Image (cartoon, rainbow, N blue to C red):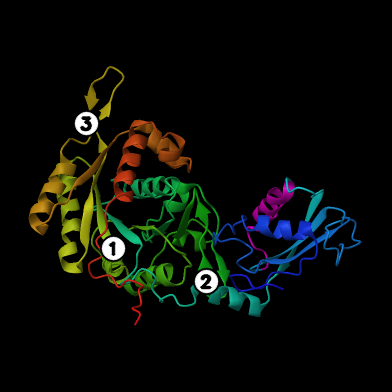
Amino acid sequence: MTDTPGPAEVPELTTDLERAAWTRLGSVLDPEIRRPVTELGMVASITEGTGDGSGGASGDSAGTGSGHLTVGVRLTIIGCPMRDTITADVETALADLAGCTGVTVEMSVMTAEQRAGLKEFLTGGRPPNPFGPGTLTRVYAVASGKGGVGKSTVTANLATALADRGLSVGLVDADIHGFSIPGLLGTTARPTRVDEMILPPVAHGVKVISIGMFLDNDRPVAWRGPMLHRALEQFVTDVYWGDLDVLLVDLPPGTGDIAISAAQLLTTSELLIVTTPQQAAAQVAARAGELSEQTGQQVAGVVENMAAMTLPDGSLLDLFGSGGGQTVSDRLTETLGREVPLLGSVPLDPQLRQDGDGGTPVVLEHPRSPAGAELRRVAESLAVRPRGLSGLKLPVTPRD
């Protein structure tokens, strides 16, 4: 056997086709962990045989077996929700492999020791809080002064637009009482537990976690401060996020317990303030941004939602007034003593609502619609924002 990066060794490979299949399986990613199954100790065996149970061509280094491959795959847990997806991905990866005449996938389950090895491989050497001081992940906490401004819709679309650009993106639905992210992303998947480690589902290329994924029914959550803090803490520390480029956190409206806990747990997070053009909403949104003075966060910018829409005759309908986003930007710039830009103004767009209700973000389903185009533009500005390294501990060790 030959050592390979990960918690397990390469299975015994005796024919050319088996070795070629192992290489090809390196392109198959676990749907939740987003790492190759060959790295994760999930490929237990690859055997070339007749496909009728007669076994492989053991010891035949010339690769003269029948061409039928039987692949043994270890699932992390019994009843793994991704069983069918993994089976299909393995079959697809090997379907056009030269010399392969058929594929059979046989499933088993990791032992406790194998799961422990997987967890050690994934989390070994990582700090308990992967988004604490020194993280290279850009963390955006999306806030609003009041509810009903479309904050969660903006967050879901920014996350999927960033992932569509090729970034590794995570999304925490921290609005415990008013969770809506699973519906906006069209996912009913539940997280997978590997002992105490939680593997988040992936929707539209985004790793996502929400309290709604743990509830049997769509029922209200009647929790108070300490429980809210513990839930957010678990979302940050117990969930395996991997190496993220960007983490977005959908905060509840206002400046309550969760907003303060997020600032404490996500020490490098920056606030994104969402408001409508209405001046009354802008005043409340500005107060949410001014919380950064107490929490030590920076404000990355302001997103104005529900701005004027263009009617078929070319006229503008400013249903919620105008200028609110710029008002928040100007007020925070003056109060905080640093520029807080207005990143974008998302127009009222029926397509945005329709796609949200359908669980298909408008930035993916209708990227050229008025709202889709503007949200993609905002996401692009966030993706290319330069990041200062001041105060960050870089993983560099000096040599003599």
Residue 391 as seen in the image, left or right of residue 60:
left
Place of residue 303 in the rendered image (x, y in percent of width and height, measured from the top left) = 25, 45
Identify the image quadrant of residue 379: top left
Q: Earlier in the sequence, mark 2 or mark 1?
A: 2
Kind of residue at badge 2: Leu
Disc 2 crowd rating (10 Å Cα; few below 14, some 14-19, many 20+) is: some
Magenta span covers which residues? 78-95
Disc marking residue 269: 1
Please name the residue that numbered disc 3 is placed on. 318
N-term-proximal mark, 1 vs 3: 1
Name which residue lies at 25% across and 41% down: 344
- Percent of width and height locating residue 123: 49, 74
- Residue designated by label 2: 122
**Hey, which quadrant is residue 362 in on the image?**
top left
Q: Is mark 2 on a helix, strand or loop?
A: helix
At a point 47% along the width and 68% down the height, the residue shown is 239
